[in-house]
Amino acid sequence: MKATHTIIALVIALTSTGVAYYFSNNHSDTNDAFLKLFVDITDKDSAQVRAHEVMTLATNNFTSKEDITIQTEALSNYHINPIQEFHLPKENFITGNSQRRRRTMSKLTKQLDTVIQNMYAEQSAKKQSKIFLPFLHSVNELSETKAKNKIIICASDLAENNKTFTCFDPISMKLLKKDPDLIEMVLLQGNAVKNLRGMTIYLVHHPRNERDDELFNVMAHFYKRFYEAYGAKVYIQDNLLTH
């Protein structure tokens, strides 16, 4: 009888240790992923980022059980634009249910799709487009979160067009190619850039024509050079899920 009690106590101790180990190694105070999606509404786009693609990236192909936050914001002729946020809580180790989790993800995907479609519906040719600074501010904010996976998607042709800098001026574009450091200083307008290690940036655009393709290629590589200098990984893609 005494031996039986000893065995039971040992099993309980080992089980408790296992549970404690699971929680200490799999449940931290940080998000699993924080994803921010930008959609440029300053001109009509020939292709669109889909909610299912965004969710696939944020949830590791719909398999993640961790805490996930997704934000959306338009890039427009204004520096500040409304932000919408979606949150998928961490699945509880004891009471979690994979079927329920999938249903929650599906519901969130539909909600996200509505928001994205509404942003694309607002697309129209605008006289100005402010892209660099709004994007930079979000990159800096995301860098300060405790998320393990920090992701920013920028669905845009990156065609800056305002009083600070315009991509449609041949002299400005020639200077950007010749002296990108100078254009960086102009666009930064005195703003600092945080340490971006651990951040992944996707620059996504399907060119409308050859001229648009050439402009996007120049600007995208300018962005890639700039942000990778601060530690981010930058991918230039025709659509979101090619990487």
Image (cartoon, rainbow, N blue to C red):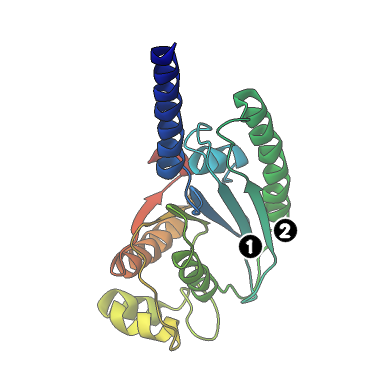
Q: Can residue 98 be seen in this view?
A: yes
Residue 218 percent across, percent down from the top left: 36, 64
Q: Pointer 2: what residue?
A: 122
Q: Circle 1 is placed at which residue position?
A: 74
Asked if the residue under mark 1 is in contact with the one under mark 2, i.e. CB atoms within 8 Å, the reply is: yes
Residue 60 disc label: none
Q: In this view, does 223 lie to the left or right of 178?
A: right
Q: Is residue 81 depicted above or below 146 in this figure?
A: below
Q: Where is residue 110 in the image (x, y as percent from the top left)?
A: 71, 38
The quadrant in which residue 224 appears is: bottom left
**Mark 2 vs mark 1: in front:** 1
Q: Is residue 158 found left or right of 196 in the rendered image?
A: right
Quadrant, the C terminus:
top left
Question: Which residue is pictured at 55% across the width and 46% down the height?
Answer: 67
Which of 234/180 is in front? 234
Position of 232 relative to 136 (above/below):
above
Task: Say what amino acid the circle numbered 2 marks.
Answer: Glu
Q: Residue at x 58, y 42 (%)?
A: 90
Horizontal relation, residue 221 to residue 127: left or right: left
**Other residues around mark 1 within 10 Å, as few (<14) / some (14–19) / many (≥20):** many
The location of residue 78, given as percent across then percent down, is 65, 75
Q: Quadrant of the N terminus?
A: top left
Label 1 sits on a secondary structure element that is strand
Q: How far apart are marks 2 and 1 (CA)?
A: 9 Å
The residue lying at 69 percent from left, 58 percent from top is 84
Q: Is mark 2 on a helix, strand or loop?
A: loop
Q: Residues within 10 Å of mark 2 (few under 14, many from 20)?
A: some
